[in-house]
Structures are given as structure tokens and as C-alpha cells.
Image (tube, rainbow, N blue to C red):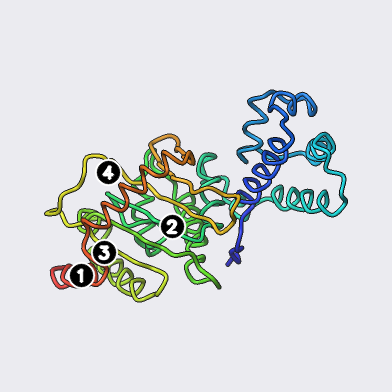
């Protein structure tokens, strides 16, 4: 199995972009002027500073020179971060079954120190058994081949290694009762998934809450979403919202704050973690 890193190239790229933006702003240089220095448009400079595209070492060196960063130690620190940010992530080996828009999410997931997720239809991916993942992935449209299913399950299994690594992220999952009752796969497979959730719930870094169908859900909750927080001060919280053909990555403070309010409301409406364990145990007796 692939060893999971404590950080990720995606996070390093965001950190590098934030550092370059701070250097530019400290010197009162416009984004357009900085972009002209490296033959880049203002919009490309914006994407660079947000960590949405990769960097060329020559461009970063030219920007550092333009910003007046001449101290060898400071320059080497930035360029070392650049080299880390440009290393291919382990998930690149799964590009055949990995949508382009999901690659950044995996990078952020690997770097996160806290992951809060709300799921409406299925058990969250990080909490799935391999058999449950296989059943969910197999229902995709267009229907995937057996090889594609195997590869996608292997990708998800590798992602899940972060749960057992040294210094794992704090996981806080709120899932709808309907997600637990949905007839995914065989009855024995669903029982194994529920037993797996009970086992995960004993881990100090994993909290699971069930939102019963009888509880009120605020209209603003909408669909499933995930919030990621990072240990590095240069990285803002990110909200990930997935839809059929793409995904949104939201990091504007006002947007993140709104989603945080919704997540907090969901946690209040859902059963407490201990009561959620009892709820899942009751489901097992009914199956």
C-alpha cells in the first residue's frame, strides 16, 4: 500500500501561492505588474496565487527578484517549497479513474487536520468498507468496467489510509438515516458496513452522527458537502461541493462561514455520537 504523506503537493502549492501573494502585497505591486514580469496575464497570476495551477521555477525566481527578495535563505526556502509543490501526488497513478476536478480534493484531504462532512445518500467515502465502495462505484453511469471498478476501489482504499496514519485528521461525519438504510449491495455487505461504522466510532479522532428522518433539517443545508481545515496558517478552510460533472472549491471567508453555520446546525439536529452508535446498533438488529 502507498504510504500517505502528512502534507500534500496541493497544499504546498496553495502555501506557495499565498506566500508569493503576501510578498507582492507587502511591496505594493499590482497583480498585473507582477504578471507582466513573468509574461503571464492577471488572471493567470490570480490562479497562481490561489494555488490552482503549477509553478515554473524560473517564474518564481523572477518574481522573487522583482519583489526584492535577495536573501539566499529566504529564496531557498521559497524555491524548496516550489519543488515540493511540483512533485506528482501518489493519486496521479490513478488518473485513468480519477476525474481532473477531484485530484485537488484528494490533495487537500491528505493535508487536512480536520474533515467535517455531511452526506445524504451514502456512507462517506473515507468511512466505507471496500465492498460497500465497490457496490456504490458499480452503479455509476455510464457503467464502469470491472477493471475500472477495481481501480476506483483501490484508489478509495489508499485514501482511507489517512485514518490510521500517525497523526490522523479529526473526522466529523454527519450522515442522513436514509444513507444507512439505502439498499446498497447485499444484506451481509450492509451489515458489515454498519459494523465497520461502529468500529470507527470507537476511534478518538472519528465522530459519527446520524441525522434521523424525524429530525428537522434547515432548508439551507442543501446537498452533501465537506469542510477541510489545515494546520498551516497560510491555508484557508476549504468547502468542497461536488455535482455531476464537476465540483466547487470555496475558500472565501464569507462562504466558508455560511457553510460552517449550516454544519453546526446539522450537528445540533443530529443524534449525539453516543446516541448515533445506539441508533446504528438498532439498525443492525433490524437487518
Q: Check disc 2: other Cα within 10 Å, few if <14, some if 14-19, many if 20+.
A: many
| Front in this rendered view, residue 242 or 31 | 31
Residue 32 is tagged as none
Q: Is residue 209 placed above or below 120 in the rendered structure?
A: below
Could you tell whether 157 is left or right of 271 in the image? right
* Side (left or right) of 150 relative to 176: right
SS at badge 1: helix
- 139 w.r.t. 37: above or below: below
- As displayed, is residue 215 above or below residue 98? below
Tell me what residue is drawn at x 42 percent, y 70 percent.
Answer: 205
> Mark 3 or mark 4, which is nearer to you?
4
- Mark 3 = which residue? 190
Closer to the N terminus: mark 2 or mark 4? 2
**Residue under label 1:** 275
Q: Classify residue 2 by image quadrant.
A: bottom right
Q: Secondary structure at mark 4?
A: helix
Indicate which disc residue 115 carries: 2
Spatial separation of the CA atoms under disc 3 and disc 2: 24 Å
Real-space Cα separation, disc 4 to disc 1, in angstroms: 22 Å
What residue sits right under mark 4 in the picture? 221
Point out residue 12 in the picture as x, y percentages from the top left corner.
65, 51
Considering depth in this image, is 187 or 53 the residue closer to the camera? 53
Q: Is residue 243 left or right of residue 43?
A: left
The quarter of the picture where the C terminus appears is bottom left
Image coordinates of residue 32 in percent, x first then y, are: 70, 23
Q: Secondary structure at mark 2?
A: strand
Q: Are marks 3 and 2 in contact (CB under 8 Å)?
A: no
Q: Residue at x 71, y 51 (%)?
A: 87
Q: Position of residue 139 (x, y in %)?
A: 33, 47
Q: Marks 3 and 4, Cα distance to the nearest angstrom?
A: 26 Å
- First reached walking from the N terminus: tag 4 or tag 1: 4
Amino acid at each position: 500500500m502507498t504510504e500517505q504523506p502528512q502534507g500534500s503537493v496541493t497544499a504546498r502549492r496553495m502555501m506557495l501561492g499565498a506566500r508569493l501573494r503576501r510578498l507582492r502585497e507587502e511591496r505594493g505591486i499590482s497583480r498585473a505588474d507582477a504578471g507582466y514580469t513573468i509574461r503571464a496575464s492577471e488572471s493567470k497570476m490570480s490562479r497562481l496565487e490561489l494555488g490552482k495551477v503549477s509553478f515554473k521555477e524560473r517564474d518564481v525566481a523572477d518574481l522573487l527578484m522583482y519583489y526584492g527578495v535577495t536573501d539566499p535563505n529566504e529564496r531557498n526556502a521559497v524555491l524548496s517549497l516550489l519543488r515540493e509543490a511540483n512533485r506528482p501526488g501518489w493519486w496521479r497513478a490513478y488518473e485513468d479513474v480519477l476525474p481532473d476536478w477531484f485530484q485537488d480534493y484528494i490533495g487537500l484531504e491528505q493535508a487536512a487536520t480536520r474533515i467535517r462532512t455531511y452526506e445524504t445518500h451514502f456512507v462517506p467515502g473515507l468511512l466505507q468498507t471496500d465492498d460497500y465502495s465497490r457496490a456504490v462505484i458499480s452503479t455509476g453511469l455510464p457503467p464502469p468496467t470491472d477493471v475500472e471498478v477495481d481501480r476506483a476501489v483501490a484508489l478509495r482504499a489508499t485514501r482511507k489510509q489517512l485514518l490510521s496514519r500517525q497523526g490522523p485528521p479529526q473526522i466529523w461525519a454527519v450522515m442522513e438515516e436514509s444513507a444507512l438504510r439505502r439498499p446498497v449491495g447485499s444484506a451481509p455487505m450492509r451489515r458489515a458496513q454498519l459494523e465497520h461504522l461502529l468500529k470507527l466510532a470507537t476511534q478518538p479522532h472519528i465522530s459519527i452522527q446520524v441525522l434521523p428522518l424525524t429530525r428537522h433539517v434547515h432548508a439551507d443545508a442543501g446537498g452533501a458537502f465537506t469542510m477541510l481545515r489545515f494546520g498551516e496558517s497560510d491555508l484557508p478552510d476549504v468547502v468542497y461541493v461536488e455535482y455531476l460533472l464537476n465540483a466547487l472549491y470555496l475558500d472565501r471567508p464569507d462562504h466558508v462561514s455560511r457553510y460552517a453555520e449550516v454544519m453546526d446546525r446539522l450537528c445540533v439536529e443530529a443524534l449525539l455520537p453516543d446516541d448515533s452508535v445506539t441508533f446504528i446498533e438498532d439498525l443492525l438488529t433490524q437487518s
